Amino acid sequence: MRNRSSGYKKPIPFLRKYIGLIFILPALLLHLCVVMIPSASTFVMSFYDWNGLKSPTFIGLNNFIEIFTEDKVVWVAFKNNLIWMLIFLIVPLIVGLFVATLVVRLKHGQMFYRTAIFMPYVLSAVIAAKLWESIVNPYYGIPIIFKSLGFDSLSQILWLGDPNIALFTVAFVDNWHWWGFVMVLFVAALHQVDEDLYEAVRIEGATKIQEFWYVTLPGIKPTFVFIISMSIMWSFTTFDYIWAMTQGGPGQATEILSSWIYKNSFTMFRSGYASALCVIQSALVLIAFIVMRILGKGAEE
């Protein structure tokens, strides 16, 4: 017998059909206002000469022509983005995977080490950047410690002032912040690998290297592909550490696409030109996303 005291009423057919859409409508509207409309506006403004205040003037493809033919800084920034990408495709993956394989084997204190390694990721980018900026400061940072220990050559290194090493210094700081997160992802993936597979290959007499190559790597392949793909995408949109520590300097030694876009928009007041740079940057990220989807499907198969 139906319980009439519950007060339950069936939704009318129209609401029942579109009730899922009603629930996601607030998030959809927010995404539309914050992402889609600004993105469309950026694409349109890339065809205009605009300083951000006065009325824009339509100039067609002139911004894109200038980017590919006249703007030498763009190519420096693109090269730095590629270097940044290579660093993040090698260092955090190797270090994160190596430490993850050690952590998952611990019988005691595993949670402590996972938390301690992950802790830098909790810090905001600006706090971590300013912390390390103080550490490498030539007047009161580690150069003073090196000098007191008698390492004069090390004490004279300008970690953020030398154009040859400034980009690698900032990348090191970002890696210090990032690799703990990569390690946690690998730990979660390693816990999903079936222990029976390890037992089977050990019975067959496999070495540790063979065990890692034929069991561990295939088992964590989806996570591996995900981290590689996201590293490629985020390498072309990184901004925080570069701007907080060097603002693209010294010279253009640490200039990347994001910092060059920011300078054109808010320093040189070339918002139309900056919009064209954003379109190119978005195209690079879109290509990386497509690659991610292709590799992801391959990993699932």
Image (spheres, rainbow, N blue to C red):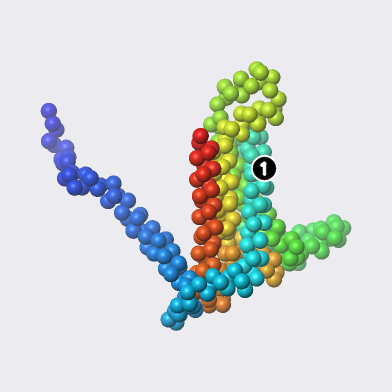
In the image, residue 185 sits, relative to residue 158, either above or below, namely: above
Residue 175 seen in the current view: no
Residue 286 seen in the current view: yes
Quadrant where the N terminus sits is top left
Callout 1 amino acid: Ile
Task: Give residue 276's position: percent from left, percent from top.
Answer: 51, 69
**Looking at the image, which residue is at 31% across and 54% down?**
25
Task: Give residue 119's position: percent from left, percent from top.
Answer: 59, 48
In the image, residue 53 sits, relative to residue 220, either above or below, namely: below
Outermost residue to the top: 203
**Looking at the image, which residue is at 58% across and 50% down?**
231
**Looking at the image, which residue is at 47% across and 74% down?**
60
Task: Give residue 9's position: percent from left, percent from top.
Answer: 16, 41
Front-lying residue, 94 or 106: 94
**Looking at the image, which residue is at 53% across and 77% down?**
269
Taking the image as shown, residue 11 lies to the left or right of residue 157, namely left
Q: How many numbered circles does the render carry?
A: 1
Task: Give residue 10's position: percent from left, percent from top.
Answer: 17, 41
Q: Quadrant of residue 69?
A: bottom right
> How crowded is the residue under tag 1: few (<14 C-alpha within 10 Å), some, or many (20+)?
some
Outermost residue to the bottom: 54
Residue at which label 1 appears: 94
In the image, residue 161 sits, relative to residue 15, either above or below, namely: below
Per the image, label 1 sits on a secondary structure element best described as helix
